[in-house]
Image (cartoon, rainbow, N blue to C red):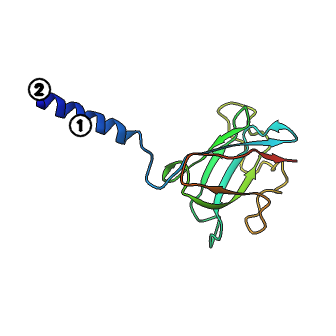
Amino acid sequence: MRRQLFALAAAACALVCSSCGPSGLYPVTGKVFVNGEPAVGATVSFVRKGAADPLKEPNAQGVVGEDGTFTLSGPGGAGAPAGDYVVLIEWKEGAGKARGRAPALSAPDRLKKKYLDADKPLLTATVEPKSNALPPFELN
């Protein structure tokens, strides 16, 4: 009986640990709207404020879904480390139109790169050491 109880406890512990995210990452969700409509297919990138080279530093990203929602993930897994971030948003022509097809890298940004300047950001966010549901980003 003791062996069975020990095996059951070990299995429960393994199950709990396997559902934990990578250390130091916190879930982040949000929404992006342009003129009140979901920016379906837009890419949202969180770049740590003060990054020496924002384009070379790993960052958390998400893609906007049909209802405007995005969920961040990065090199370390789902979520982002706690801290202050510059938020960059790019919405390529053709993004979100055809399932399974990504827009061409050379496709123009529907937002005219207005939300892509890490040196003069228009959007910022703070990731708290908890589950984060951010207020919507309302763009025009």
Q: Position of residue 71 (x, y in %)?
A: 62, 42
Is 112 on the left or on the right of 103, as rendered?
right
Q: Where does label 1 land, which residue?
A: 10
What's under tag 1, amino acid-wise?
Answer: Ala
Residue 11, compared with residue 17, is above or below; it is above
Residue 133 on image: x %, y %: 64, 44
Question: What is the count of numbered marks?
Answer: 2
Q: Position of residue 56 (x, y in %)?
A: 60, 65
Element assignment for label 1: helix
Where residue 41 sits, quadrant-wise, is: top right
Q: Is residue 45 above or below residue 102?
A: below
Residue at the image position 51 percent from the left and 53 percent from the top:
75
Q: Earlier in the sequence, mark 2 or mark 1?
A: 2
User: Disc 2 marks which residue?
Assistant: 1
Quarter of the rendering occupied by the N terminus: top left
Between label 2 and label 1, give the one nearer the viewer.
2
Please name whichever residue, 23 or 5, is drawn nearer the observer in this view of the structure. Answer: 5
How far separated are the C-alphas under marks 2 and 1?
A: 14 Å
